[in-house]
Amino acid sequence: MRRVVNYHSSWARQQQVEFFDASATERRGLAATKKELKETQVALEASHKVIAGLTEIGLSMSKKIEKMKVKKQLVKANHVECHQKFQARIHEAEESMQAQHLLIEALVDEKDSLLQTIHDLQEANNAPAPFDGDWEEEPEEEPEEIEDIPLGEGEIDDEYDIF
């Protein structure tokens, strides 16, 4: 019987050793899994922080882009307004030049008429002519016209065009 007991006792020990070996292996496996889980959690938290930072940067850039779009629209509107004012000033200057040209023509005609009247009066009074009768007229000059620049043809520099 002793043999059986020893066999049984030996079998129990073997089972106990196998249990402890399996438990130790399982514990090592669990420890490794726990360590991997902790590393994964740390990496996940770091990823979340990076994503949050990138999201914040993206929102900040979106706000800046919107501000730049508004500024671009204001600059464009200001350019159009300045262009219209400039065109109005050019038009006023052209009208003034045309009025001055008409006035000069009227004054030249009046001068010619007065000279002719003086000449006629001198002939009627038999007075000597202070000039030989052929006076030189100044050649008429055509006023320079300033070309209108249509609103649609002016170039707007979109140097900061984002989209």
Image (cartoon, rainbow, N blue to C red):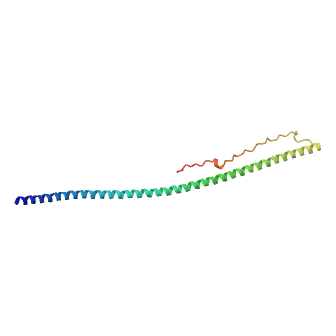
Query: In the shown orientation, is residue 134 left or right of residue 56?
Result: right
Which one is nearer the viewer's eye here, 49 or 136? 49
Residue found at x 5% / y 58%: 3
Query: In the shown orientation, is residue 141 left or right of residue 86?
Result: right
Residue 101 vertical position relative to residue 67 in the rendered view, above or below: above
Residue found at x 58% / y 54%: 75
The outermost residue toward the right is 125
The quadrant in which residue 55 appears is bottom left
Which one is nearer the viewer's eye here, 59 or 117? 59
Figure label count:
0
Q: Residue 25: x percent and y percent?
A: 21, 56
Which one is nearer the viewer's eye here, 138 or 140? 140
Q: Quadrant of the N terminus?
A: bottom left
Query: In the shown orientation, is residue 132 left or right of residue 21?
Result: right
Q: Residue 134: x percent and y percent?
A: 86, 39
Q: Residue 148: x percent and y percent?
A: 69, 47
Residue found at x 45% / y 56%: 57
Residue found at x 66% / y 51%: 86
Which one is nearer the viewer's eye here, 44 or 135? 44
The outermost residue toward the left is 1
Q: Residue 130: x percent and y percent?
A: 88, 42
